Amino acid sequence: METVLFLSHADAGKPALETLAAAKALGGTLVVGLFGADVQAFANEIAGCRATKILGVAGADFAQARYASDAAAAEALVKASKATIVVAPATSRMNRIVSGVAHRCGGRADTHVTGLAGGNITRWYYRQRMESQQSRTHRPWFIALDPGCHAAYAGAPGTATVEAVSVVLPAMKTQVTGVKAPESSQQTIRPDAKVLLVAGAGWTKKQPDGQTHVPEAADLIMGFLNATKASLGSSKSLVDLSGEGQAVLPFMSHLNQIGQTGSTPRHAKGLSTCCHGEEPHAVGWRFIGERRAINLDANCGWARGKADVLYVADAFAVMRKVNELLASQ
């Protein structure tokens, strides 16, 4: 029988709950391994998962993401659990260490996994056009599950008993002195938001009066994001404008890019504005349930079966009215 270790940092949030549910579905003996500044709170949240034991590495040294300390903690948890399969959420913090920890433990690692079923994993290839199922006989097997690919664990909380695992840390060459982040009002990437607003290059092009209106476009987009707490995506053509010396939206970067060369969002609803909706961009919407688009061209790509609803209208006028309605609520 397999011993399945759910391995995560304690502040991973929803991706951790999704991965825990996927690990439970594998069957076998479930063990939980957590590391972070304080692991007790999260252990209590998942106390009802029926793990045979919950292992923890806690302390100030593990508060911030840092390869040396995170990898040492994860290695100690894997070895203490004697796991044959290790399932971890594919957060940036876990992705940084999972391959290195697998090497230290003599295992093999698979990342960007989108599904677990029995002894197989599912992965996407060729810009998400091909799906494969794979399995390994080598143990331990490390699996990093992408967020949004499994229903989250929703068991009752309780009071968990955490077994402390000791870690001998190597000499620390990196010191975390703080975190620099944008103001909350300028936060545009929200993976847990219900709505994704995607902006295309049309926002920065000349409008019917022959002039560009980039400042107004920025105000309309940010007004919608602030009112709805939606997430912001972008087409490649828009984020590339900065390299061409053209006016750009000040809050837009390549981190917002979705599609073949960007991320694949998993929001419940998506609204595309000023985007043509051709395959390179639309492929990024694969996991979005309800798709709507605003475009002046009734023959754009969104009208060819890629959107549930297409509004043939001017995005400036539509979003201006939407923001007015939101402000009146």
Image (tube, rainbow, N blue to C red):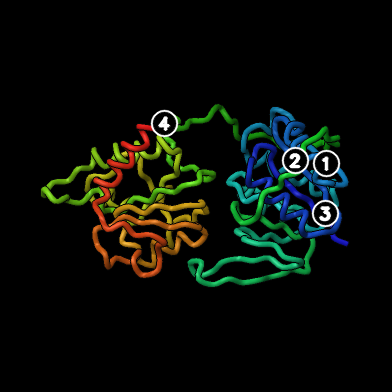
**Tag 2 and tag 1, C-beta contact below 8 Å:** yes
**Tag 4 and tag 3, C-beta contact below 8 Å:** no
Give the camera-side residue of 17 and 169. Answer: 17
Q: Amino acid at mark 3?
A: Ala
Give the camera-side residue of 76 and 10. Answer: 10
**Which residue was labeled with disc 3?**
83
Q: Residue at x 74, y 34 (%)?
A: 39
Q: Which callout, 1 or 4, points to the residue nearer the camera?
A: 4
**In this rendering, would 74 be left or right of 309?**
right
Image coordinates for residue 229, horizontal then vertical, percent: 45, 38
- Disc 1 to disc 3, C-alpha distance: 13 Å
Q: Residue at x 17, y 46 (%)?
A: 212
Image coordinates for residue 113, horizontal then vertical, percent: 63, 60
**Which residue was labeled with disc 1?**
54
Image coordinates for residue 304, horizontal then vertical, percent: 36, 70
Q: Residue at x 79, y 37 (%)?
A: 56
Residue 57 seen in this snapshot: no
Looking at the picture, does residue 136 appear above or below residue 217?
A: below
- Disc 2 to disc 1, C-alpha distance: 8 Å
**Which residue was labeled with disc 2?**
34
Mark sitting earlier along the chain (4/3): 3
- Disc 1 to disc 4, C-alpha distance: 38 Å
Give the camera-side residue of 307 and 159. Answer: 307
Image coordinates for residue 112, horizontal then vertical, percent: 60, 59
Q: Which callout, 1 or 3, points to the residue nearer the camera?
A: 1
Q: Amino acid at mark 1?
A: Ile
Q: Amino acid at mark 4?
A: Ser
Q: Amino acid at mark 2?
A: Leu
Q: Secondary structure at mark 1?
A: strand
**In this rendering, would 90 be left or right of 230?**
right
Residue 299 seen in this snapshot: yes
**Which residue was labeled with disc 4?**
185
